[in-house]
Amino acid sequence: MTATVYVPRDAAALALGADAVAAALVSASTAVGQTAPGIRIVRTGSRGLFWLEPMIEVATPAGRIAYGPVTAADVPGLLEAGMLDGGAHKLRLGRPEEIPFLARQTRLTFARCGVIDPLSIDDYRAHGGMKGLARARELGAAATIEEVTQSGLRGRGGAGFPTGIKWKTTADAPGNRKYIVCNADEGDSGTYADRMLMEGDPFALVEGMAIAGFAVGASKGYVYTRSEYPHAIATFDAALVIARREGLLDAAFDIEQRVGAGAYVCGEETSLLESLEGKRGQVRAKPPLPAHQGLFGLPTVVNNVISLASVPSILVDGAAQYKALGFGRSRGTMPIQLAGNIKYAGLFEAGFGLTLGEIVNDIGGGTFSGRPVRAVQVGGPLGAYFPPALFDTKFDYEAFTARDGLIGHGGVVVFDDTVDMARQARFAMEFCGIESCGKCTPCRIGSVRGAEVIDKIMAGTNVDANLALLTDLCHTMKFGSLCALGGFIPYPVMSALTHFPEDFRHPVAPRAAA
């Protein structure tokens, strides 16, 4: 008899010793004279409960039973306790679906992550894969676009633009060749949803891109992946080989993965297109929009990984069912990524509408340090800092915009009461200066001047005058920058000034001004 044990190979689990756990299980299975049954190991993605990684699961007649966090040293004791039959042990977590963090979720896009072998097309099909593409072909191109439009799906990369409208614009644009470009240049702090999906369920992205290609009449797709994701790059490349072998990709529509060189600004769609064309990653002026003149000057759909991977479930379950989830104009589910000083870090997929307080305190469990939460940054390095007084804010594009914030890619980074918000504001300006493509003056020069002004404020030099100057500078960057990098950097700076003014008046001895 052979027992099946599922061991994650997601990058987060690997960083916490998943390979050593797998090796210990192999060693135990092949040990001379062992009396335990053989062990079949299946390497999966992660379910996203990072504080429990490596979380391994055992197939039993009663369903999968999870154990975690497991180290290689725990393996002998787990086997002695009857883990292969779901036996009791201090690390036993029970059925994964009943763990509160997972039980509260609505998993659509990430339903297969941590469940299947990412590179088994049979596993993918057995868990509902390829049904979305089949339905798209039944509906036809125009009806597929209409289904996506009616679902209310908006870009999950941060802009929140309606996906169906973008697709229809590209479909209607004249051109004998069109492209689907997937933005996998996930650069926001505290985000990892794209990586998790590409490592844990790559065929979902392949299927979503194939549906998009069919819908708009594109014959070629590109995935632009950040170089810092070696495991995602390798897994997706392997998935493409399998997809071609299985006939999912062919001359009618094929996908190629390109790896970026680490520039944050290439997360902006036009800068990404410039990089794909082999040029320096600089922002293009708009119009023309990429949907009209994108990659190589031809009509191009540029969507985020999660946007594209959400499409198959919309086609399978129908637009109405997807649209029934969410809040306001934000429909469907969002993979909320909890990071920073938080007790339960991980990916939580749910419909829009949870409050920020529910996300941080109820789901995330408050700070890891046990100290009070002081600030939460949502939306990456361009996102605003929200104090607990704003924890009633709904996780919704419009609700955050109304309070001078943004959801971005769904990253939620928590800080306790030891954080210095003036230093956080300075970091935003410094980050912008380093990552600016240099094309426009407000971003290129304003960010450098901003860091210098904050240095003077922190040194106690002409504080009132420099605070006024900083505010004016933020206004110039917000309305004068060519793209969102310079245009949104004022969000973290001004939110720090607004909600944490005391941190900009440190009782420190002034130093010489620059």
Image (tube, helix red, strand yellow):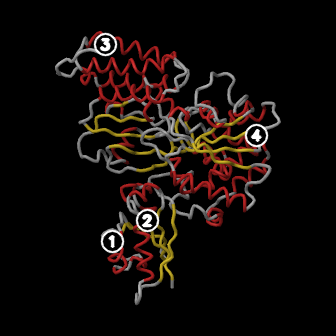
Residue 100 in which image quadrant:
bottom left
How many neighbours does mark 4 have within 10 angstroms: few (below 14), some (14-19), or many (20 or more)? many
Q: Position of residue 480 (x, y in %)?
A: 52, 15
How many neighbours does mark 2 have within 10 angstroms: few (below 14), some (14-19), or many (20 or more)? some
Q: Position of residue 90 (x, y in %)?
A: 30, 70
| Mark 3 residue element | helix
For the point 73% across and 57% down, which residue is it? Answer: 248
Q: If you read the primary sequence from the N terminus, does the residue marked by circle 4 or circle 1 appear first?
A: 1
Which residue is label 4 attached to?
Answer: 216
Q: Which residue lies furthest to the top in this view?
A: 465
| Mark 4 residue element | helix
Which kind of residue does numbered mark 1 sit on? Asp
Question: How many angstroms separate mark 2 from mark 4 (CA)?
Answer: 42 Å
Q: In this view, does 361 lie above or below 125?
A: above
How many neighbours does mark 3 have within 10 angstroms: few (below 14), some (14-19), or many (20 or more)? some
Which residue is label 1 attached to?
Answer: 74
Q: If you read the primary sequence from the N terminus, does the residue marked by circle 1 or circle 2 appear first?
A: 2
Which kind of residue does numbered mark 2 sit on? Asp
Q: Is residue 36 above or below residue 21?
A: below
Which residue is label 3 attached to?
Answer: 466
Is label 1 in contact with label 2 (beta carbons under 8 Å)? no
Q: In this view, does 313 lie to the left or right of 297?
A: left
Question: How many angstroms separate mark 2 from mark 3 (CA)?
Answer: 52 Å
